[in-house]
Each structure stands twice: as structure tokens, then as C-alpha cells.
Amino acid sequence: MSMMPTARGPRRGATRRRQPRRGPGLPGGAGFDRWLDRLVDIAVIVALLVGGMALLMTLLAR
């Protein structure tokens, strides 16, 4: 595939889609959704810390 522009004009890429806004005025469960996202973040961080500590203890116990 040639990198030179053709007679048809410049090359065109994919159309970018707009991201939906998450503002304070969203109807439905927007507040619950943010709360759930925060809860999942905390759960993942705790799981990583516990797993890291278990690995460290296993390696030091040898």
C-alpha cells in the first residue's frame, strides 16, 4: 500500500465517536455507578495487596 496520496484525495481514517458525558445531572443510577466503580477499584487494590503479601511470605518462608 502506497503512502503517497492518490488522485482521490487524502487518506481517511475511522470516524471518532464522542464519549458520553458523565455529569452530575445524569438520570438513573449514575451515582450508584460511580459508587460501584469505586468499590470495584478498592476490591482490586486489596486483592493485589493480599496476593503480593502471600507471594512475599511464600518466598521468604523457604
Image (cartoon, rainbow, N blue to C red):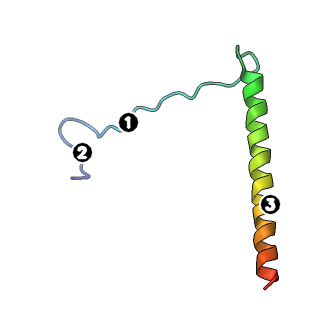
Mark toward the start of the polypeptide (3 vs 2): 2
Horizontal arrangement in the rendering, residue 9 relative to residue 51 (left or right): left
Q: Amino acid at mark 1?
A: Ala
Q: Nearer the viewer, residue 7 or 2?
A: 2
Residue 52 lies in quadrant: bottom right
Which residue carries the number 3 mark?
Answer: 49
How many C-alpha atoms fall within 10 Å of the one at disc 3: few (<14), some, or many (≥20)? few
Query: How far across and how far down the image is residue 44, in percent?
Result: 74, 50
Check the image and report above or below for 28 versus 18. above
Q: 10 Å neighbourhood of mark 2: few (<14), some, or many (≥20)?
A: few
Q: Which image quadrant for residue 21?
A: top right
Q: Is residue 19 left or right of residue 50?
A: left
The kind of residue tagged 3 is Leu
> Picture coordinates of residue 53 (x, y %)?
81, 67
Residue 31 locus on image (x, y percent): 77, 23
Relative vertical location of residue 25 with respect to residue 46 in this rendering, above or below: above
Mark earlier in primary sequence (2, 1): 2
User: Which residue does the image show at 57% across and 29% down from the upper left?
Assistant: 19
Residue 14 disc label: 1
From the image, state whether disc 1 or disc 3 is nearer to you.
3
* Pick the front one: 51 or 41: 51
| Separation (CA) of disc 3 from disc 2 | 52 Å
Q: Is residue 57 left or right of residue 8?
A: right
Residue beneath the point at 40% across and 32% down: 15
Name the residue type under label 2: Pro
Within-10-Å neighbours for mark 1: few <14, some 14–19, many 20+: few
Disc ID at residue 5: 2
